Amino acid sequence: MRKVIILLFILSIAGEVFSQATDYLKSDFHQERRAAVREKMPANSVAVFFSNPVRNRANDVEYIYHQDPNFYYLTGHKEPHSILLIFKDKQQVESSSYDEIIFVRVRDALKELYNGSRLGKEGARSKLAINAAFEGPDFLKYNLNFTKFDKVLFYDFNNDVRDFEEKGDLYELIASFKQKVNYDQSTSLNPEPVKNNLDMQMLDQIMNELRGIKEPEELQLIRKAVNISAAGQAEVMRAMKPGMSETEIQGIHEFIFKKYRAEYEGYPSIVGAGHNGCVLHYIDNYKPDIEDGELILMDLGAEYHGYTADVTRTIPVNGKFTIEQKLIYDLVYEAQEAAWKICKPGTKFTDLYAATADVINNGLVELGLYKSSDPKDIVNADTGRNRYYPHGCCHHIGLDVHDKGEYDVLEENMVITIEPGIYISKDSPAPQKWWDIPVRIEDDFLITKDGCELLSDMAPRTSDEIEALMKETSPFEGIVLPDIDGK
């Protein structure tokens, strides 16, 4: 009981240190981002953004709603059934002129009783700082001649939006937009020639350019998300013992996330012990008894105020690497260090991968797992990928775990991962002593003016540091739950 009290006390203090309720993005940030989009838009154009659809989980239960990252980036609006229009030039409508307009869902007292308050058009004007704010049904009758624009910029549709019994819902907004812009321009439906001004590629390029370079306010939130995620990794290192389940380990991570007031996980948590760690995107996380002598690969990221981290650690379940495990772990660590050394503005993304692959391939040759570093000796014929290092090593993080951004050369204020890995499964041609050794080390880095900064250093990275931390006592060991099996 005393350990439980200590745990709660420590985490309550940590929660105050990490999290304050005043660090949300402000409306002027989103306003500036809309202006940045406008600046990049071509002459005489309009950009159209839709909110994310509501997803059904089962029967009358929906998944917890998550806003489309682009829509959130530009508005801060977290509700569904909305559409945003950004105009290159001011539009004159009766006595008003504006260069942006948003349509949000209708206020409904009964629905709000069950599901919480809605912002409404008045709230959108005051809290989102978009003066031209109206309700969804208004868009259905909104008289805008889209053919007058040289370009109508938008993302193409995936046709996976449900029709809700709500006037002006996303289904109706999309249908109305398609009709207004002559989206279906087949001759059978539109015998008259129509102006083909629809562009479904340019907008993604604009958003890549903007979102790939982080603003100071974004960096603050990313740092917090990374610190929370790294703190979770460190605490699990203390708590890990043989016999625990993958689900239990996932739960400790996500408890830490919630204690620090992270709203979500940035992506489905990956907690794979033994062979499961060799499945790159393993998310079942249900192995009931993690075995002594196994490695466990834990790839998790907290999402804090919309921004996600992406941190991976691989640790020995019993607190001590075997000889083979340590050799592979240290090789992956060396590969990550090699990429870190050249990580700076002007370096190509491909150079980062090449640095990690060179270390791994040559290291596996020295260990006798590859005959040579020639592609014919390292490529798996079935997958066409490097047999033991089958994935890339770097991606942007931000509003998405695989965030938008350019993948040419590094630029200042990009935030990326470096995540080399080696995965030797039991069905590989390696000698049996190497089987079921999965290792991935993933850290988050901020590209600075003349180098890069490791953001996720709260979680130990070297094999010696990990073993040392795993010797420490965890306050989670003091939690004893009642028997629920009736024995």
Image (cartoon, rainbow, N blue to C red):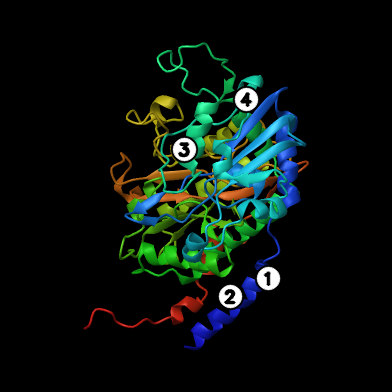
Judging by the rendered image, the residue that carries numbered circle 1 is: 17
Tell me if label 4 and label 2 are in contact, CB under 8 Å.
Answer: no
Between label 4 and label 2, give the one nearer the viewer: 4
403 or 135: nearer the viewer: 135
In the rendered structure, find residue 384 and report the number of the disc placed on it: none
Q: Earlier in the sequence, mark 1 or mark 3?
A: 1
Dividing the picture into quadrants, the one containing residue 10 is bottom right
Q: Earlier in the sequence, mark 2 or mark 1?
A: 2
| Residue 30 visible in this rendered orientation of the protein | yes
CA distance for labels 1 and 3: 36 Å
CA distance for labels 4 and 3: 47 Å
Judging by the rendered image, the residue that carries numbered circle 2 is: 11
Dividing the picture into quadrants, the one containing residue 46 is top right
Q: Give amino acid for label 2.
A: Leu
Q: Would you call the spot at circle 1 few (<14 residues within 10 Å), some (14-19), or many (20 or more)?
A: few
SS for dot 4: loop
Q: Would you call the spot at circle 4 few (<14 residues within 10 Å), some (14-19), or many (20 or more)?
A: few
Q: Give amino acid for label 3.
A: His
